[in-house]
Image (spheres, rainbow, N blue to C red):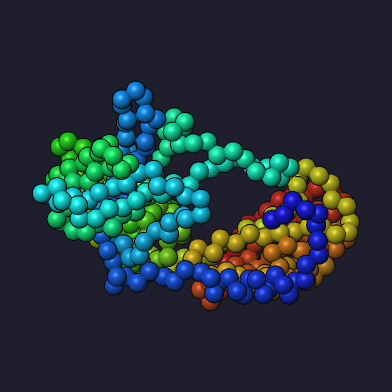
Amino acid sequence: MSYKSKQWISPYTYLKILNARDNHQSAPADPRRVRSLLVLAVRVHRRFGDEERIEFRRAYRIEAAGMVPRPSDGAISPLSVDLLDAHRRIIATHHCLYTRAQASCCCCGGGVAVPLEREPFYDLHEAIEWPGEQVAAIVLHNGREPLATIEVGEPPRVELSGPERRDQLLALRVHAEHPRARPSVVLLFSGDDRATWEPVAFDPPNGEVLVEGERLQGGERCFFRAVATAELRSASADSSPFELPRSRRRLYLRLPDSQCPIAPGPVPLSAMIDCRGLGAVAPDEIRWHSDLEGDLGVGYEVSAQLREGRHVITVTAPDGRGGSLAERGIIIVGGRPAGIAGQTQR
């Protein structure tokens, strides 16, 4: 993206950039190296007189591989978290990081960062490694007296029912309860017999979760898992195993604005692909065809030379599972486009 005038760039440069993308993608997490994490969301309100208020918004205790990348450039640490044992000795300390958002524009070239002490509040979202069951409490502080303390209490109860198939959706019911606190809930999905997990929903309203099955990887033995957290303790429940078809990429065709007449000559066409974790698609794998003109070219965007008449435009791309996707649309040159006709898979 650039604010400068358009410049011509060789398609070979784009291909080189695309081919190099895989070299910089993060490696999949090793499921054998899972660790216990506390994902904490807090809101720190501006100090008013002698009162300094911290609001605990959500806390999740989960098992996961690796850590969440942390920002560094321009980050500050306005708050720290001490993990204490039963004797109030510090087991570990986690320093929260905050990156100020500042307004900028292309004409002025920068903006002004407002000091945190002048903001009405600021939010922190932290992934903290949990040392084990010896943790009895966590204390939030800014280097002086504790601002807030959370004691480790009893775990919640959680139940999971489903999934029930509703057309293209999978419906589940999650029920979590605790005598003193409102549990936080995260719903996970596994398509490889519980070897790896991915989050699909957080804190579902009224306990019902509707998941689009096509957006999941799928497999022969799939599971859902609900993890509920309250008072820094967690409990989980798994669904029964079920089979789900493996997902494929999705292909979307973009045609010219239907409100504008289209004159014979070059017509811009573009495609968008939802890769769904199956890797990027090279431009030369996306092919365009017209029933009147024949082949129109390859790439995410093409400028197709179209004569007057009704054109059925077809764009195809690999589906990531050994097959292909096709999306069709109708363009009337010399009139108005009739819109997208639909997607087919083969």
Image quarter (top left, top right, bottom left or bottom right) of the N terminus: bottom right
For the point 31% across and 43% down, the residue is 143
Give the image quarter of residue 194.
Answer: bottom left
Q: Position of residue 205 (x, y in %)?
A: 34, 39
Left or right of 89? Residue 22 is right
For the point 25% across and 60% down, the residue is 36
- The answer to whether any part of residue 146 appears in the image is yes
For the point 18% across and 50% down, the residue is 84
Q: Position of residue 30 (x, y in %)?
A: 35, 72
Image quarter (top left, top right, bottom left or bottom right) of the C terminus: bottom right
Q: Position of residue 81 (x, y in %)?
A: 29, 47
Left or right of 252? Residue 310 is right
Give the image quarter of residue 260.
Answer: top right
Q: Position of residue 139 (x, y in %)?
A: 24, 43
For the point 31% across and 25% down, the residue is 50
Asked whether 95 or 62 is in front, the reply is: 95
The answer to whether 282 is drawn above or below residue 113 in the figure is below
- The answer to whether any part of residue 165 appears in the image is no
Q: Which residue appears farthest toward the front when viewing the image?
A: 144
The answer to whether 344 is drawn above or below residue 50 in the figure is below
